[in-house]
Amino acid sequence: MVEARSSTGTASGGGRVLAILLLAYIFNFIDRQIIGILAVPIRAEFDLDDKTLSYLGVVFAIFYSTIAIPIAWLADRRSRINIIAASIAVWSLFTAACGLAQSYGQLVVARMGVAFGEAGGIAPSYSLIADYFPKSRRARAMAFFSLGIPIGSALGIFFGGWLATQLSWRSAFIIVGLAGVPTALLVKLVLKEPVRGGLDNDAGKVSEPAPPLGTVMRALAANPSFWLLSFGAASGSILGYGLIFWLPSFFNRSFGLPLTDVGWFYGSIVLVGGVAGTWLGGWFGDRLGTNRPGRYALIPAVCFLITAPSFAFGLFAPNLYVAWLLFALGQMMALAWLGPVISAVQHIVPPNMRATAGASFLFINNLIGIGFGIYFLGWLSDRMKAEHGEDSLQYSILYGLAFYLLSSLLYFLAARRLERDWYRAPA
């Protein structure tokens, strides 16, 4: 069954679909990022150094990124709704299983399961949203969906810290994991499949059947904008994922905040700064980029130039009030890329390639961002411990901020290329 279009050009029920997918994405990031604040008690219980602890991110990134592409290829051919619902159930149950781990090895295996589930949730959602909202509203729709990143991350930090303090880190995993299961039923029972590509031409025709995976891969490989957008996002995500994992430990070590206070302090930074940046990035993307595709990349290019110094000064802030303002500004600028860039990735391929293109983008972004970012900051912190002692993590993050500048450069290059690589449906 497919949805019809409303008189405004949006597929009927688009607002409902977006709200439910946002809820799913919130749980996705609660389950993904709760490990950041729970890393403090996990590290203590299993007696881990920073490099060993960072393997949780490496394993997650490898499983998530590798499995996402074949699942997305299937989503270009089969029901995206069924795939998303099954994925939510899997990642939620494996998050709860993390709380049953009695060793570090068991915890690593459980996080593999979380990665397997989350691999099937995002790229099919991108494709679904693109078929519910017209081009002129897609950046805002993608930005609204992407609010799940700061909201879910903030809630993971809030409740992870509070539950770990009041109960235990194992209870935190079990409670937040089981809380996400009903969302899978909501997706399955309420959402409907829209017409693929129905909003990309005036006739509202169903798009051509999805081509073989090799055809999609060759098309992406020959598209310079895809590579610039993907590696621009990956460079920024090295710090995006690295910071969300390591900043709770930084605030605990360098500012002396107990776990509960870290939850409220850093959680509020992620929530306020992240929501503002994500929404404003999408709004500016639609306002500036609908008729000028290059501006979809120009927005994050400028924002990342502001992000790096904001976080740098925040690391050495004289007090918590100044630190909060600087980190909130940095968080806002760091997430402004989501709406414009995700929308741009959906626009450089035909509708029947969108889920696979989105998964390929996420493969690069997450494999480098989660895997390398979390590991790199932990590895560098251990290497600098002899020189900086307990402040080694602070300096590790400082030097890592150079990746934001690299991301800005790649987006400036993408801004000059997007117009030529933009997909335009045949008349």
Image (cartoon, rainbow, N blue to C red):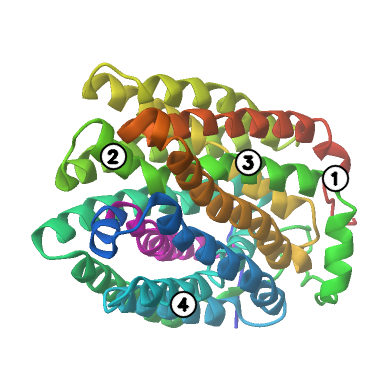
* Residue in the image at 41% along x and 61% along y: 32
- Marks 2 and 4 sit apart, C-alpha to C-alpha, by 27 Å
Residue that badge 4 annotates: 113
Q: Upstream in the sequence, badge 3 or badge 2?
A: 3
Which label was assigned to residue 266? 2
- Marks 1 and 2 sit apart, C-alpha to C-alpha, by 37 Å
Question: Which amino acid, by three-letter code, is at mark 3?
Answer: Ser
The crowding category of the residue bearing disc 1, from other C-alpha atoms within 10 Å (few below 14, some 14 to 19, many at least 20), is some
Q: Is residue 139 left or right of residue 73?
A: left
Q: Nearer the viewer, residue 398 or 26?
A: 398
Residue 36 in magenta? yes
Question: Which amino acid, by three-letter code, is at mark 2?
Answer: Tyr
Does residue 317 sit above or below 362 in this rendering?
A: above
Question: Which amino acid, by three-letter code, is at mark 4?
Answer: Gly
Which residue lies most toward the top here? 318
Q: Nearer the viewer, mark 1 or mark 4?
A: 4
Q: Which residues are magenta?
A: 11-38
Asked whether the residues under the numbered discs 1 and 4 touch, taking CB atoms below 8 Å apart as contact, a structural biologist would say: no
Name the dominant secondary structure of the magenta segment: helix
